[in-house]
Structure formats: C-alpha cells, structure tokens
Amino acid sequence: MAKFQGIEKNAFIDNMRVKGNFFELLDAGMSFFFKHLSQSGVIKGLRREEQLEIPVEALREALTNALCHRLLDSPSGSVGISIFDDRVEIENTGHLPNELTPETIKLPHRSYPQNPIIADTLFMTAFLESWGTGVNRMVEACKAVGLPEPEYGTDGLFVWITFKRPHAVANSDTNSDTNSDTNSDTSLDTGLDISLDTNLDTNLDTKKKLSDKQKEVLAFCVVPRSSREILVHIGVTNHTRNRDRFVNYLVDEGYLERTIPDVPNSPQQKYVAKKK
C-alpha cells in the first residue's frame, strides 16, 4: 500500500506492506484509505458517521473482490493499493473471467469466482454476495456522490480498478468549461489551447484535427509515459481500442514517439511527444 506524491509512482509519502488472513488484510486496507483520503462527518441520530471522499462501500467492495479473486498460485502474487493525487487504484494478480471484459463487467452478469472456496467462505460470513451485483453497487455508490463510474483495466497479468478523486473531477470539469468558452478552433496548429512544451513540433500534419483527449495526451507526454499512465490520466479504460485511438494513432501520425522504438511491445515501453 502506498500514498504517492503526484500522479505517478515516482515518489511516495507513505508505504507499507501487510501480511495476514483475509479479514486482517481488509481491515488494514480500509484503515489505509481512512488515513490518506479526505473525510467528512455526518450526524445521524446520536452518532457521527465518517464518510470518505470516495464511498466506503465502493472501496470495501473493490478491495474485497481483489483479495477474493487474486491469483493464488503465484508466489509473488499480492493485492496493491495505490493512492495518487487524482485517483485511487486497487490491483490484484490474475485476470478477468473469460466471460467478462473491462466494459461488460459493468453490465448485469453472473458471478464467476476465481477461488470458489474462498468466495463461498466470504459469502457465508456476509462479506461477499454471490449474484455478481457488486460492481453495479460500486457504480451506483460513486454516482450518488457525483463521482464518475470506477474503471476496470487488465493486461492479462493484473486486474485493477480506478476511482477518480473528487478534486480531480472538479478540476477536469473546470478545465473543460474554460476550454469550451475560450477556444472555438481545436486544431493543433491554430489554437494551441493546451499546455504543450514550446519545443513540440507544431508543423506535423496540421491538416488533421485532434480530439481534446488526444491533445491532452500530447500535453501529458512532454515526459515519457507508459500507455497505462496515459489512459488513466485521460480517464479511459486500458482497452485495445483506446490504446489504438489515444496512443498508437498519435505514434502513427508522428505526434508521439516510442522510447524503445526497436521493440514496440516492450513491457518498459513509454511514449513522449516529438521534439523539433
């Protein structure tokens, strides 16, 4: 578990590792959330209830799923909690069931437990339901407080869920409103309404117009970024279609370049906006 400074895993403010059974790990994870996420209090009856900036029930459900469904035959397998300035990520080793994708997991579906014995135990102790409705409850909990739906991602080795933090959503909305009010031309060469490095090549095929999110990618990639970092930053799922649209397209059109051009599919591959 780590609380990172900024939006990347470059430097952490708090870092800890916990070992134990399911219940000990769930308690430790929830305590870490309460330690590093903003809280507010609501008086209900004679009691004061603490509320987190991201709904507690959504975080608990996501962490329960990660602990329950993680891949257990890997000696290095674990569950990770990463808290950034703009988001919270919970990841576990493993993969989504073959019947589900990061998109369809939000639709009504049956339960496909990766570890049936653990899932059955958690069902009997009321920590897990067996109807496949947990994802929908997380979505509804986030919507109820004005947050975007959590996003799932997978690369075949890990599964992760991303929750946007409220101030990141507010900043995004403000920037969107400002851009829509002050910029009517979204082409790269005329408005230049994004915070691009002044050394970026603005002579690259300026006849093609880029979407706001594609321009946001260029602004973000003034330093090398992985495809996962890029997609998380612009708030879309780590899906092949999105990688093609927001990463590979910009590479093909000459706006981005790979840091390891000879091995396009390298696990260490990153992308950076082209310089003059």
Image (cartoon, grey):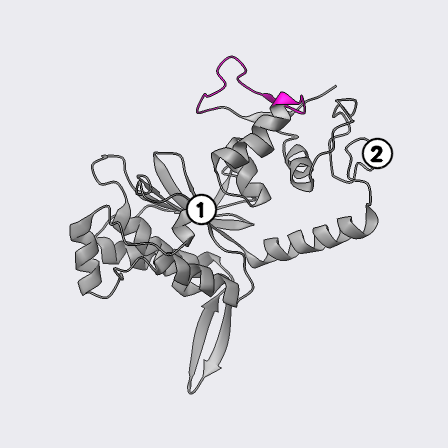
Foreground tag (1 vs 2): 1
Q: In x, y percent, where is residue 204?
A: 75, 22
- Quadrant hosting residue 91: top left
Q: Which mark is residue 103?
A: 1
Q: Secondary structure at mark 2?
A: loop
Q: In x, y percent, where is residue 17?
A: 33, 45
Of callouts 1 and 2, which one flags the residue occurring earlier in the amino acid sequence?
Answer: 1
Q: In x, y percent, where is residue 175?
A: 71, 51
Which residue is denoted by mark 2 in the rendering?
190
Q: CA distance from mark 1 to mark 2?
A: 36 Å
Is 72 situated left or right of 260 in this image?
Answer: left
Residue at 59% over, 43% down: 234
Q: What is the crowding at mark 2: few (fewer than 14 residues within 10 Å), some, or many (at least 20)? A: few
Residue at 40% over, 44% down: 160
User: Main SS type for the magenta part?
Assistant: loop
- Residue 257 within the segment the image draws in magenta: yes
Is 257 placed above or below 166 here?
above
Amino acid type shown at disc 2: Thr
Q: Which residues are magenta?
A: 252-268
Is 10 placed above or below 69 here?
above
Can residue 58 be seen here? The reply is no
